[in-house]
Amino acid sequence: RKEVEQDPGPFNVPEGATVAFNCTYSNSASQSFFWYRQDCRKEPKLLMSVYSSGNEDGRFTAQLNRASQYISLLIRDSKLSDSATYLCVVTTSGGYQKVTFGTGTKLQVIP
Amino acid sequence: NAGVTQTPKFQVLKTGQSMTLQCAQDMNHEYMSWYRQDPGMGLRLIHYSVGAGITDQGEVPNGYNVSRSTTEDFPLRLLSAAPSQTSVYFCASSYMAGGFRSPLHFGNGTRLTVT
């Protein structure tokens, strides 16, 4: 089983739709969780950290479920500019920071 | 702010050639790392460093060397390039304080082709 798993998609959604991605992780000792966005042929960029109580940033909401070992990202009112690949990132402390990336979920927002 | 700077952006090598990918950051980050990204594989850690003089292997270290003589710089050396090393390489850095809650900052990437 992969340490961090994501549905690769693609998710094709119309503008204005709400879309949700899940990411599961296997290490129960994982400490920090992030969502990154990666545009085609560009570097990953931090979208948002994921906190235990859940957090929201504008149209984006992130949730963490430690019991079931998954995190989620909800995007409301999708824009064309949201089209990208969304990477789930999990950090575990094993002496030093171990950062594990999911393979990403591709989102295509359609006019 | 410059952030994380990687050079070159593109490189073509012949099998057996060596080269160094440069990475520099100006944020005084303790942690620096190199990743490669291949289609369907996601980002895989090659080597990382938690401070000057300290480096360690990641998931896919074979064929690569690193050094960390200063806080700012973390070059990646390909010793004898192979076609399997054709990939996109990213350098990333972060703070280590705060219980590993600091996100990674990435460079723009280097697209390497080995023929």
Image (cartoon, helix red, strand yellow):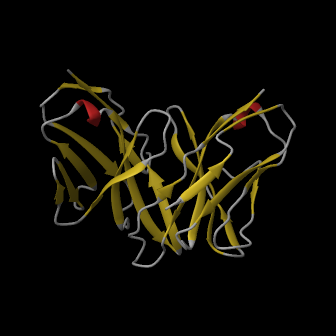
Q: Residue at x 78, y 26 (%)?
A: B115
Rendered view: B28 above or below A14? below
Q: Which residue is most to the right? A: B16
- Residue A11: percent from the left, percent from the top? 27, 28
Instruction: Residue at 36%, 68% (x, y): give it.
Output: A31
Residue A33 rendering spot, x and y as whole percentages: 33, 60
- Which residue is located at x 53 percent, y 59 percent? B2
**Residue A82 to residue A23: above or below:** above
For the image, the number of numbered tags is 0
Answer whether residue B59 is visible to the viewer in this image: no
Q: Residue furthest top?
A: A111
- Farthest residue to the front: give it: B1
Q: Position of residue B107 (x, y in %)?
A: 55, 52
A89 vs B91, left or right, is left
User: Can the viewer see residue A38?
Assistant: yes
Residue ID at (59%, 55%): B5
Position of the C terminus of chain A by quadrant: top left
- Above or below residue B108? Residue B50 is below
**Can you say which quadrant of the picture contains the N terminus of chain A?**
top left
Q: Position of residue B31 (x, y in %)?
A: 56, 69
Find residue A67 and report its image quarter: bottom left
The quarter of the displayed image where residue A91 is located: bottom left
Determine whether, in the image, residue A86 is placed left or right of residue A93: left
Q: Would you say B63 lies left or right of A92 here?
A: right
* Viewer-closest of A92 and B20: B20
**Residue sitting nearer the eye, A49 or B28:** B28
